[in-house]
Image (tube, rainbow, N blue to C red):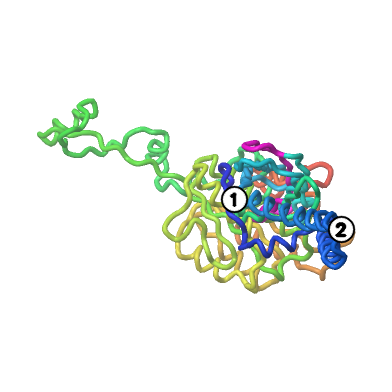
């Protein structure tokens, strides 16, 4: 059983004929007991007709056990999950197929799949008698408002004989995994200032990004296209020279996600931590689509895709980042120093950060993360405002003081309140007025601080 296509699996565990006797139903046990009693009475009383009845009552449930036991191992099941990766609150379809590969028909079948409770109720299906070589297909839908990786399975099949004497369960040991990713919101195409930071010396890099050739020539090599001959350099050097093609360089960006457990409160899809995770996912995907080279970094100092290089603007890079964010959880870190050490070690370019609660010490560490020549944008969740939501309780947080320290250090820092829309905040961060334009938003969809 796999997400990409159907597969078959053997029994989950051994089950001999002796174990199959444990599947006798109340009717089957009653027939067996009545048959044994009738046989004993016939032997004592010498009644040949009663002996025939007793043998019939005894043999019938035993025969059903033998037939059903053999049939159980000739019924196969498969599962198809489509798609295997969905955003939060989106649905995925699970298709189940049961096939009878034996020469005997089956009785009534009950199909049951094991799913985590967050995906919905456990699906159960009742299938009618299946002819030899027949197959049945059923499907159900699963959805979750909480991101994560959820196992589906094992699939269980309960078989009964036509007389209702025995019920046996067939288990399939294979699992599928549904990955529920954080929601990704489309962001407006604004300029945050990180494009130039990743290009070095500006104009020449821009030409390379546009696909033009570097004017620095090199010597001709066998196989070079003659259309690339640079005649002016050829005349100057006295030998054949060709234009050297420079590999495009891309702007760098680091998306920093604060996952400290003591920086957030509450749980569930509407909690501030989930807002921060969804914001990091939206920012990363948006910047990848704008041809940035994106690296995801958490407060633990562990970068994704890793220390060997930043991600590329491909579906694989977006998938890697979203898979990581699908399972990210609170860390045990108490400070941002590990992330600061990674940023100080290099990378440069645009920095987009999503912070939880920042005390004075951690706000100072965060303020130093911004490099002098780089652009840094921070979304600071106002824990006081989130605590004021119904059903939420948290101690007071110095969000506005942290916001002031970040802005004094050169950050474009915005305060996030409950109900804030990331596209609106993103547009403000890229506006000429920066955070000062926050007051122009209508309806309280974003929060700002002094």
Q: x%, y% of residue 134?
A: 65, 36
On screen, residue 397 above or below 28: below
Q: Secondary structure at mark 2?
A: loop
Q: x%, y% of residue 208?
A: 38, 38
Mark 1 vs 2: CB contact within 8 A: no
Q: Residue at x 43, y 46 (%)?
A: 199
State the residue in front, 46 or 226. 46
State the residue in front, 229 or 67. 67
Q: Quarter of the image for the C terminus: give it.
A: bottom right
Left or right of 448, for residue 184: left
Q: x%, y% of residue 356?
A: 70, 63
| Observer able to see residue 70 | yes
Q: In which image quadrant can residue 331 be found? A: bottom right
* Mark pair 1, 2: CA separation: 28 Å
Q: Residue 143 colored magenta? A: yes
Q: Residue at x 49, y 43 (%)?
A: 313
Main SS of the magenta segment?
strand
| Mark 2 neighbour class, 10 Å CA radius: few under 14, some 14 to 19, many 20 or more | few
Q: Most extreme residue toward the top, as rendered?
A: 227
| Observer able to see residue 153 | no
Q: Secondary structure at mark 1?
A: helix
Q: Residue at x 42, y 34 (%)?
A: 210
Residue at the disc numbered 2: 389
| Mark 1 neighbour class, 10 Å CA radius: few under 14, some 14 to 19, many 20 or more | many
Q: Earlier in the sequence, mark 1 or mark 2?
A: 1
Q: Residue 417 colored magenta? A: no
Q: x%, y% of residue 140?
A: 73, 42
On screen, residue 64 above or below 263: above
Give, as a single range, the part of the protein colored magenta. 130-157
Residue at the disc numbered 1: 322
Q: Most extreme residue toward the front, as rendered?
A: 46
State the residue in front, 441 or 125. 125
């Amino acid at each position: 059983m796999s997400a990409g296509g159907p597969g078959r699996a053997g029994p989950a565990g051994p089950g001999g004929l002796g174990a199959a006797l444990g599947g006798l139903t109340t009717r089957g046990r009653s027939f067996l007991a009545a048959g044994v009693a009738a046989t004993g009475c016939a032997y004592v009383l010498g009644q040949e007709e009663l002996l025939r009845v007793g043998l019939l009552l005894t043999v019938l449930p035993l025969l059903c056990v033998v037939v059903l036991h053999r049939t159980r191992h000739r019924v196969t099941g498969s599962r198809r999950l489509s798609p295997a990766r969905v955003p939060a609150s989106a649905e995925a379809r699970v298709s189940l197929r049961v096939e009878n590969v034996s020469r005997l028909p089956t009785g009534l079948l009950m199909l049951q799949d094991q799913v985590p409770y967050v995906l919905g109720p456990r699906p159960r299906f009742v299938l009618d008698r299946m002819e030899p070589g027949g197959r049945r297909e059923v499907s159900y839908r699963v959805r979750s408002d909480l991101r994560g990786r959820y196992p589906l399975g094992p699939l269980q099949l309960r078989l009964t004989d036509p007389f209702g004497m025995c019920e046996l369960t067939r288990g399939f040991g294979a699992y599928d995994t549904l990955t529920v990713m954080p929601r990704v919101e489309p962001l407006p195409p604004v300029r945050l200032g990180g494009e130039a930071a990743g290009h070095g010396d500006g104009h020449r890099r821009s030409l390379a990004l546009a696909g033009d050739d570097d004017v620095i020539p090199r010597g001709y090599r066998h196989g070079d296209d003659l259309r690339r001959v640079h005649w002016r350099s050829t005349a100057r050097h006295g030998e054949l020279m060709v234009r050297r093609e420079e590999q495009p360089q891309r702007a760098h960006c680091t998306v920093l996600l604060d996952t400290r457990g003591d920086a957030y409160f509450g749980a569930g899809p509407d909690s501030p931590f989930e807002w921060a995770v969804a914001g990091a996912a939206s920012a990363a995907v948006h910047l990848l689509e704008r041809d940035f080279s994106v690296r995801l970094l958490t407060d633990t100092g562990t970068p994704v895709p890793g220390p060997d290089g930043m991600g590329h603007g491909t579906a694989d890079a977006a998938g890697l980042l979203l898979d990581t964010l699908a399972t990210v959880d609170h860390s045990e870190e108490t400070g941002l120093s590990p992330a600061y050490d990674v940023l100080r070690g290099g990378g440069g370019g645009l920095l987009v950060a999503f912070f939880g609660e920042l005390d004075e010490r951690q706000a100072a560490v965060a303020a130093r993360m911004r490099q002098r020549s780089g652009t840094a944008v921070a979304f600071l969740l106002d824990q006081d405002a989130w605590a004021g939501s119904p059903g939420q309780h948290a101690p007071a947080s110095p969000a506005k003081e942290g916001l002031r320290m970040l802005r004094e250090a050169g950050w474009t820092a915005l305060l996030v309140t409950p109900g804030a829309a990331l596209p609106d905040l993103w547009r403000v961060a890229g506006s000429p007025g920066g955070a000062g334009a926050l007051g122009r938003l209508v309806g309280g969809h974003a929060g700002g601080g002094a």
